[in-house]
Amino acid sequence: MSHLTRLNRFLRRQMQVMMQVMMRVLCLAASLFGLAGIALSGQASTSHYLVREHIVLDLRSGVEWLRCSVGQTYNQGSCEGDILQFTYEEIPEIIKQANKELGGRWRLPSKDELALLICADCPPPRIEKTIFPQTGAEPYWTGQRNWLVANNYWSVNFMTGHSYARSFPEKPLAVRLVRDRVSP
């Protein structure tokens, strides 16, 4: 391994550590001073989220989530309406519409990003319900293909808490959108 490669890896790791420290400082400031529009959950199991109205910042992965599933509308701590299910073919139009209406570059999460939302200690749906209210106890699409069976995609099931690599694109599943963090 060349010196430049090792230096590059070292610098990337240092940047990641710096970002984690900055997020912890932001969390502390939010909890101590009640920063405008930002609330930090007081529960130990949800301390890795910053919540601002309909968007949640996941401090572990650095991505922003919509609090509600596609089809629902966020209203004062609750997700109202029905969770809609879509085939994989319909999702690009959903993302296009979300980008237009909400701004940003929304997308399907990776399997790992979506699996981070699983709460193993929670009853179904296995997700922090104070952070992601009215989530369906059902499978949700990811943007990740099954590398072994290219026609199938990964899904994460909030009923069981497990990820599955056998979701056929023709089968309608629920959708939760994510975007890479937008700097303020």
Image: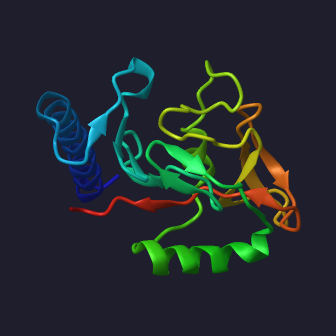
Assign the C terminus to one quadrant of the image: bottom left
Please state the horizontal and vertical placement of residue 70, each as a whole percent of the image: 63, 61
Q: Nearer the viewer, residue 14 or 184?
A: 184
Using the rendered view, name the quadrant where residue 137 is placed. top right
Residue 145 seen in render: yes
Q: Residue at x 22, y 35 (%)?
A: 27
Q: Identify the residue shown where x is 35% and y is 52%.
A: 1
Image quadrant assignment for residue 31: top left
- Is 76 rendered above or below residue 103? above
Q: Is residue 146 visible?
A: no
What colour scheme does the image use? rainbow
Residue 167 location in percent, x, y? 84, 55
Task: Please state the horizontal and vertical placement of residue 118, each as a whole percent of the image.
Answer: 60, 33
Viewer-side residue, 132 vs 106: 132
Residue nearest the observer in this picture, 61 or 96: 96
Towards the viewer: 13 or 138: 138
- Image position, residue 152 (x, y; %): 83, 61
Q: Does 29 sit left or right of 138 as displayed?
A: left
Relative to 50, say whether 75 is above or below. below
At x 65%, y 30%, the residue is: 126
What residue is shown at x 37% (from left), y 33% (from top)? 48
- How many discs mark residues in the rendered view? 0
